[in-house]
Amino acid sequence: MSVGKRYKDKTKTKFSSWEFRAYYPTGKYDRFGKPEVKLKTKAGFKTMKEALDAEREFLNSIDNNNIELNKEITCGWVMDNYIKHLEDEGKAKGTIENYKSLKKYHLSFFVDIKVCNINQDHIDYWENELRTKKKQRGGGKISNYTKYDCVKFLKAAFRYGVKKNKIKVNPFKDIEVTCPSSLPRNRLSTTEVKETIKLCKKELPSYYGLYCIAIMTGMRVGEYSALKVEDIDFRNKTIKVNKQNTRNEYKDILKTSSSYRFVHLVEELEKAILWHMEKFDIRTGLLFKDSTGKPVSSKHVSRKFQKLLKLYGKPENFMRVHDLRGEYIDIMHAAGNPTEITSREVGHSKTSTTSDIYTNLLDEHTKEAMKKFNAMFVD
C-alpha cells in the first residue's frame, strides 16, 4: 500500500492528482495455501493528506467487513492460524506440539470443512467418531481427557479467529464438556518426606538438591531445572523464578504471568543447595546440568525420582515427580499457612486452583476445625 502522485502523461510532467494503491485479502487461497490479494487503486485527491485519509478509511472498512471476504476459510486454516499465533507469542513448546497432535489425529474430520458450513450435525458426528475411536498406541478407547483437550483447543482457536475478525462466529462455543476429575494421587507422609530426603542424600547425591527444591518450594520441573546460582538470593532468602526448561528448550517465558515470582528459601533448603554447590563445585550458571552442560531434562528428573521411591520401598508409579507440587501444598496447609501464601509460592493465579486441585488435606482440616468448633460449646 502506498500513496503517490498521478500524472496525465508518461513523461510525468503534468500533475493530475494524488492516488493511493492498497492490496487487500480476498479470503481465497491458492493451491499452495497462500492467501490471494487484490489491488485497490483510487485517484482524484488534491492533497497527499486526503489520499492517506482515504487509504486509511478503505483499509479500516476492509478490516471491519472482511468476514464477507473470508467465506472460503476452512477449519484447518483457523487451527493453523491460532497455532502460528502461539508460536509467534513464544508460548510453551509442549502446548503447541499437543495442539498440532490433536489437529492431526483427532480433529482431521474438520480440517477441510469451510467454517461457514459447520453445523451441529458435523459436531455430533465428530463426537460419535471420537467416542468409538481407539488409541493409536496401547489400544483402548480415547479418554475423556482427549475430548476435553480437543474442545478446549477448538474453542480457543475459533475465539481467536473471531477476535481477529477473520471469521464471523465460533461454531464450537456452545459445546459443553466437563474436565474429567483427576485420578487420586498418592502422597508421602511427613515422616516419609524426611526419610526420603535423607535416603536421597545418601544414595542419589546428584539428585538430592533437586529433590529438596521440588519438595520445599513446589516449583515445576521445568522451573527448577532452569535455575541458575544467580537466581538465589541467600541474603534475602529468596529464589527468583523467571525462566524454564521445557522439552529441552531453555526459555525466558513461563506458563502464566503468575508464574513469575520469588519463592522463599527456608533454612533446610538453603543448607541443601549449599551442600549441592560444594559437592559438585558449582559457583555460577546452571544449578543442575547434565553431562553436556545443558539443563537436566524432565525425563532425567522423573527417572531419578522413581528410582528414589523404589529404593524407599514404594510401588512402581506410586507418585509422579509433578505430584511433589501437591506434596508441598499439603505440607504448607499442614503447617497452618494460609492458602493465599501457598498459592503465591507455587505460582497459581487463583487460590481455588491451590485448594481444589492439589490439596489432599482439606477434608482432614475441616473435620479437625469442626471438632475445635464443637469444643467451644462443651462445658
Image (cartoon, helix red, strand yellow):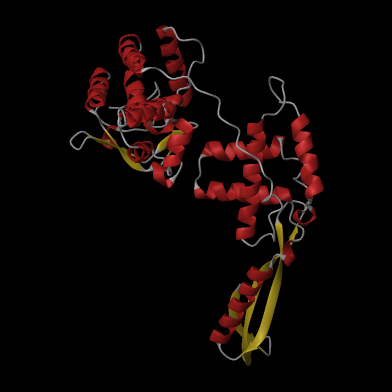
Near-viewer residue (245 or 190): 190
Nearer the observer, 138 or 149? 149
Q: List x then y, in percent, for residue 217.
A: 33, 30
Work out which residue is located at the far left of the displayed protein and give it: 235
> Compared with residue 205, is residue 172 higher up or lower down, i.e. above or below?
below
Looking at the image, residue 240 lies above or below residue 330: below
Left or right? Give the position of 307 relative to 112.
Answer: left
The reply to whether residue 244 is in sight is yes
Residue at the limit of the structure toward the front, as seen here: 379
Q: As drawn, is 243 to the left or to the right of 137? A: left
Q: Is residue 319 above or below residue 31?
A: above
**Which quadrant is home to the N terminus?**
bottom right
The residue drawn where x is 49% and y is 46% is: 90
Left or right: residue 191 compared with residue 17: left
How many numbered marks have been drawn onto this rendered protein structure? 0
On the question of residue 250 being in view, the answer is no
Residue sitting at 63 percent across and 32 percent down? 145
State the image coordinates of residue 226 (x, y, percent, origin top left): 38, 33
The C terminus is located in which quarter? top left
307 and 73: which one is in front?
307
Q: Position of residue 213 (x, y in %)?
A: 33, 26
Residue 160, by quadrant, is bottom right
Q: Residue at x 33, y 26 (%)?
A: 334
